[in-house]
Amino acid sequence: MPGLATESIPETWPARWWETQPDGKVHCYLCPRHCRIGEGQSGFCFIRRNDGGSLVTLGYGRLAAVNIDPIEKKPLNHFLPGTSILSLGGAGCNMGSMFCQNWSISKAKDDHVRAAVLSPAQVVRTAGQYGCPSLAYTYNEPTIWGEFIIDTARLAREAGLANVMVTNGYITPEALWDVYEHIDAANIDLKAFTDDFYRRVTLSKLDPVLQTIETLCRSGRVWVELTTLLIPNHNDSDEEIRKLSDWVLEHVGPEVPLHFTAYHPDYKLTKDPPTPPATLRRAREIALGRGLHFVYLGNVHDREGSTTWCPGCGAPLIVRDWHSILAARLVDGCCAKCGRRIPGRFPARRH
Ligand code: SF4
């Protein structure tokens, strides 16, 4: 974003969520990777470092990307649709996804990709200047710069702004509510439904992600939508999509929106082809057939798969193409035709 002033913030900032081990290393328990970090070394995510026996973060206010996006790009289809969101991203990641679609920043060390240094107050002011009713912590994995998110989100709430996490869900139960206490909505990646995929392709584990999804959805305190990037030959079998849909239905219910998005070859996973539109449509049919009410397609032009349909009467409620809204027939969050309430947060009156 042009014209952003750079603020003076120390390069290192005291980190939270760590303890000293008997061997002198520090144990970071922000995410399930539980790095044990020796003096002068960094954790897996690059941006948390042991400085003289204390854990510091290099990610406080040091941003690799600052943009204004349509909120549909996060993707969120049931949270303030049709609005702009000030989107912030930093460097590093706590997963090792070989197909990462944002790898130029997620695999970077902080000083290689810095676009701006902003204080929480400056972020909130910028959102106000550009008329954005919400902030997104996104692009790379925001969990790893949780200290900055907490300070920014708190101020944003005081200013009447909403806070959105776009996340892989890889956070420990110990840290989860410290961060999510201040968060209004999240899009959580459910990258696949086998632990084998998570271990082999993302160097992480499936179970902690499922735990995060369940905890946030069941709390009722954070609006949650899920995203699965379908990668040909890796996570796109009918059986896996059926199992994933069944888990969503059984554990968090039919009203949680699920987005299937198209993959393009990137980073280290370049041999598989882009996701064919037919694969996305098949996945959507399976998920709807298992009983989910709101299943969307992303990264493709597919009007039917991008539209919010009323589960009560079948009327098209928010007609979309890619990230654009073409028509809206919701009144106070309800279907204009049959009155069925649509879950999420919608602007009052006709949207
Ligand atoms: S947040 Fe970073 S340093 Fe901490 S456990 Fe996760 S990967 Fe390791």
Image: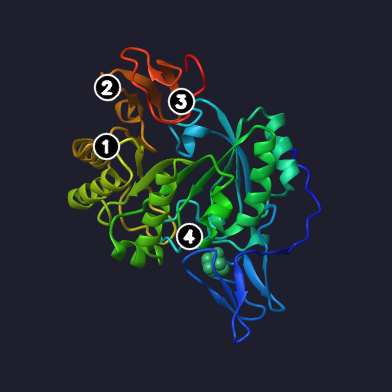
| Ligand 1's quadrant | bottom right
Give coordinates of residue 75: x percent, y percent: 45, 38
> Which dot, 3 or 1, sits closer to the camera?
1
Who is closer to the viewer here, 237 or 225?
Answer: 225
Residue marked by disc 2: 312
Is the Cβ of the residue at disc 3 closer than 8 Å to that at disc 4? no
The image quarter in which residue 23 lies: bottom right
Question: Is disc 3 placed on a helix, strand or loop?
Answer: strand
> Which dot, 2 or 3, sits closer to the camera?
2
Q: How far apart are marks 3 and 4 (CA)?
A: 36 Å
What number of labels is visible? Answer: 4
Give coordinates of residue 259: x percent, y percent: 36, 40
Name which residue type carries label 4: Pro
Residue marked by disc 1: 292
Name which residue type carries label 1: Leu
Who is closer to the viewer here, 76 or 26?
Answer: 26
Question: Is disc 1 placed on a helix, strand or loop?
Answer: loop
Residue 3, numbered label:
none
Decide if residue 3 is on the left or right side of residue 85.
Answer: right
Residue marked by disc 3: 324
The image quarter in which residue 4 lies: top right
Who is closer to the viewer here, 271 or 245?
Answer: 245
